[in-house]
Image (tube, grey):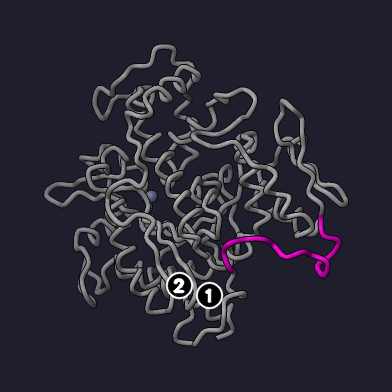
Amino acid sequence: MFRHSDFVILSSFVIRASSFLLLIFLPALRAAEKVSILGSKPKWSVLEHYQETITRDEFAHLINDVYCTHGFAPDLIEINEKTARILLNRETQKCFTLRFAENDASRRPVPRLWRPAESLPRAKPERPLSGLRIALDPGHLGGKWAKMEERWLHVGDGAPVQEGDLTLGVARLLAPRLRKLGARVFFIRSSNEPVTAKRPDDFQELARKILIKNGVPQPRVDVLDPNDPEKEQTIRWQSEILFYRYSEIRRRAALVNFKLHPDLVLCLHFNAEGWGDPNSPTLLDTNHLHLLVNGSYLQDELEFDDERFEMVRRLLSRAYDEELPLADMVAKAMAKETQLPPYEYPTTLTTTKVGTSGYVYARNLLATRIYRCPVVYCEPYVMNSNDVFARIQAGDYEGMRNVNGVERKSIFSEYADSVADGLADYYSKARGL
Ligand SMILES: [Zn+2]
């Protein structure tokens, strides 16, 4: 059965409680392979390309301190002196054997399509991002989808706040700043329409199966009203989340991995605290900033064959070596410009603080896991804080203006400027400019 209350406490706004319901309580739909929601069968043979590209010490460090910080069942990953054995599938008990490089000098090069800063061609100091391919991923959809996504709030006579529209606005300001610094910039989403061609109705059958498997033998079709306490047990609600989260992010990943081939993806979001009724949301004084990189897999997530495979592939691609210092540098620039304190998760059960800035956490989100390149996921500003709410209502503007008693940039320019500054800092340093 659903145990909603258990998860409300654990989850932050980044991924709502509901997504955990699907992941954790969905037993595999196919018995032989245990594959996560809308996931595909892992292609373990591609890991052959990573033989002897990593030493035992590096592998053990990444497993213990980044990816599997919450532990794992001992039969899933076994680290020996010269090899690691990774279980493909409980049913067949087959394993993939990774051979370690003996030492740093004998490490074979890591095969990958994205380029770390150090392998980019020479650049001029005023164009620290030259040659870099950056894909911008404005989080969520916005527009007519914002209410369905539960990324919509409305106060009095003000315009509704829709996260998907805010993130697209930031991406549009950020792109020219990054191009000026020399980058080639791509939009993973450039309007408030989905990238996926699927719609909620396409997932009704799957939603019904998921609910039945989770102990709702006769799921209701529709939600009664937005405050329906059992809405998460309806086919409507489940098919919508399958559409706007799982199908949408997996389509975005296909775009990233097979078409755009960026060196870096920036996921742009605005954070929030629980706001209650979206038509009469709670406004608070709390405001904060944090960034996420992939890691910190839960034991239950590692039980899925595709998630375990994607984790190992990501580890071996060494995306972390690039995304962590990058996230730290962007975090520092954002902290300096926004003056926001670091967000502290109320629990350490889902995230692990990493890096040196105090603002970066490892967490296993779908986007940070399946985009096959370094991914920096930005979560500044609590949309339902009094100050941020006032700044969003003020919209974008040139220069400085007095908003909520303080003279400052628009919140959108501040976001875009600080991300661009952080990237310029990182690539200038890493390329020795
Ligand atoms: Zn978001």
Q: Which mark is residue 333?
A: 2
Instruction: Verify whether residue 391 appears in magenta.
Output: no
Q: Is residue 150 above or below residue 312?
A: above
Is residue 418 visible in the rendered image? The answer is: yes
Type of the residue with mark 1: Tyr
Q: Residue at x 52, y 65 (%)?
A: 263
Separation of residues labelled 2 and 1 (CA atoms): 10 Å
Instruction: Verify whether residue 106 appears in magenta.
Output: yes
Q: Is residue 234 above or below residue 384?
A: above
Position of the C terminus by quadrant: bottom right
| Span colored in magenta | 100-115
Q: Position of residue 188 (x, y in %)?
A: 39, 56
Check disc 1: other Cα within 10 Å, few if <14, some if 14-19, many if 20+. many
Q: Position of residue 261 (x, y in %)?
A: 50, 60
Q: Which residue is mark 1?
A: 426
Q: Residue at x 37, y 52 (%)?
A: 139
Is residue 57 visible in the rendered image? The answer is: no
Q: Is residue 67 above or below residue 325?
A: above
Residue 396, quarter of the rendered image: bottom left
Type of the residue with mark 2: Ala
Q: Residue furthest top?
A: 218
Q: Secondary structure at mark 1?
A: helix
Tag nearer the camera, 2 or 1:
1
Check disc 2: other Cα within 10 Å, few if <14, some if 14-19, many if 20+. many
Q: Position of residue 176 (x, y in %)?
A: 33, 73
Q: Position of residue 154 (x, y in %)?
A: 20, 45
